[in-house]
Image: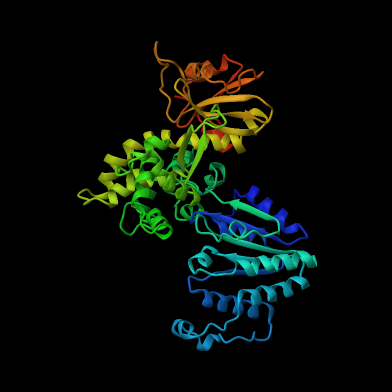
Amino acid sequence: MRFTGRSRELGILRTGFDKLEAQCHFVSGPPGAGTSTLVRHASKGRSGLSFRCPPRPDPLIRLSLRDRIEQTFHQAPISSDLQQSETTHESITQSSGATLGWAQLFSLLLGQAEKSKPFILTLDDAHRLTEARSRFEVALADALRKAQGSGIPFHVVLAGRAGSMPKVGLDLPITAPKTRIHVGPLPLRAAAPHLPGNEAYEKIRAYGVFGGYPGVLTHLDTKVTVGTNVRRLLLPDTGSLGDLPMTWLETAIHTPTRYIAVLESLSQGEAGWAQLSKAIPDLTKAGQIAPYLKKLSELGLIHAHRSLDARPRGRNTRYALSDPFLAFWLRFILPWRSSERDEEIVPYYASEVRPRIRDHLQQVMAPVCRRHMEIDALETFGSNARDAGAIWNNEAELPIAGTLGTGATYYGLCLWDPPANRPRKPELTPLEKIDRSIRNTRYGFGREQRLRVVFTGKNTPNWLRREAARRSDARIINASDMLGDKSDQGTS
């Protein structure tokens, strides 16, 4: 698929590569997030060496890197007791270990860096260095110090799976400047060209099912419907995406059962510690959930956010899944693939999936809308948000809230499919609900401009348009606005 949606991350890396000093760059993300593609585009046209660490023992990783150096720079064979033609797992195990070490390898690369400035060494799939218990950190730190002392712009990029990356720069301090980039799912607009559907709301519906990971989007057929893609890719035993999330988890976590229980709870919506601790019945205290949340956060599968009106030391924190695809898979695909499957695929989709997609989309819309305010609100408000989050307390519930770059605060709701007719009293309209919640929060109090925002998905009924039009502080953001499509999508 076409490389898209990574302008911020690409800019950070390229700016770092332009600096004429030694640096270490860490690029991590969940499987399928596109870390390798990002680094490849950032280093295109620059001198250096890119090496993908194989899933092999440390001596064989070093041997592969040695061969890669020789092939790339056409050097004479490097003296070593490890000769490729004679090396096997058994011989390595039996040998005393007189091999070409990391220090020698980095020294060779530093020699090349002196000839080509700046020089970029990419160690891709760097999590395999951790899995192989490679002891390269001290050698890398020494190489960076030498490069700094000699004024050599030696850039080292460690790219790989979040949660398993080497700890160099953390457990082992390095003096060279460090850059850390986490690669998450593509935002809606960047993912849209790779999603099925012609109308804006169809694209959002597809995003609510398949999310924004490039490793998932590459499998989609944009010429057929969301339902057809689900029935082809997720539900059959041979479907290419059917077991993908389980593969992610089993690769990163030895026994993922409890972690899956936490993720299943979050697939029903954002939740706090107390609620999530109930997902694992044998936990006796809410605090015991902490290690599971920490690991899932490190893997990039979930993220935490605090209510914007929480006190500085308050613990008013909620957790959410980082991408809609995992939520959809947990709610609809895992139960199907774990069952006896008495039903055929088409009846199952018609009876269990299609009727519940509306509720699923309502659950996953809030993070998508918050992301819109953060990176795409310029067209509507003349400024993107410098703070994008949510507000919740005993008397207020606002899934969208924050502060624009202009200083104005905003408060909002998400409605995937608003009712066709205006609610009858005493039920409140969306704007009235926002007004009530604003009265029960201190966030934004005293600001000159306080905006009300209603996000709509499938349709925007006329009564809601008229209600917003009568107020100077209200905005409707529909599916077309979220996709940047200037054509209106109609009413109901």
Q: Is residue 36 above or below residue 480?
A: below
Is there any visible trace of residue 178 in the rendered image?
A: yes
Residue at point 72% right, 53% down?
Answer: 15
Residue nearest the viewer, comparing 57 with 250: 57
Where in the figure is residue 94, as x and y percent of width and height?
46, 85
Is 234 positioned to the left or the right of 15 in the image?
A: left
Mark count: 0
Q: Is residue 146 above or below residue 29?
A: below
Where in the figure is residue 479, as x and y percent of width and height?
51, 33
Quadrant in which residue 38 is drawn: bottom right
Is there any visible trace of residue 45 in the rendered image?
A: no
Where in the figure is residue 320, as x and y percent of width and height?
45, 40
Quadrant in which residue 486 is drawn: top right
Residue at point 47% right, 22% down?
Answer: 396
The color scheme shown is rainbow
Where in the figure is residue 385, as x and y percent of width and height?
63, 33
Residue at point 56% right, 79% down?
Answer: 63
Which quarter shows the C terminus?
top left
Q: Is residue 204 above or below residue 4?
A: above
Residue nearest the viewer, comparing 218 with 135: 135
Quadrant in which residue 253 is drawn: bottom left
Which quarter shows the N terminus?
bottom right
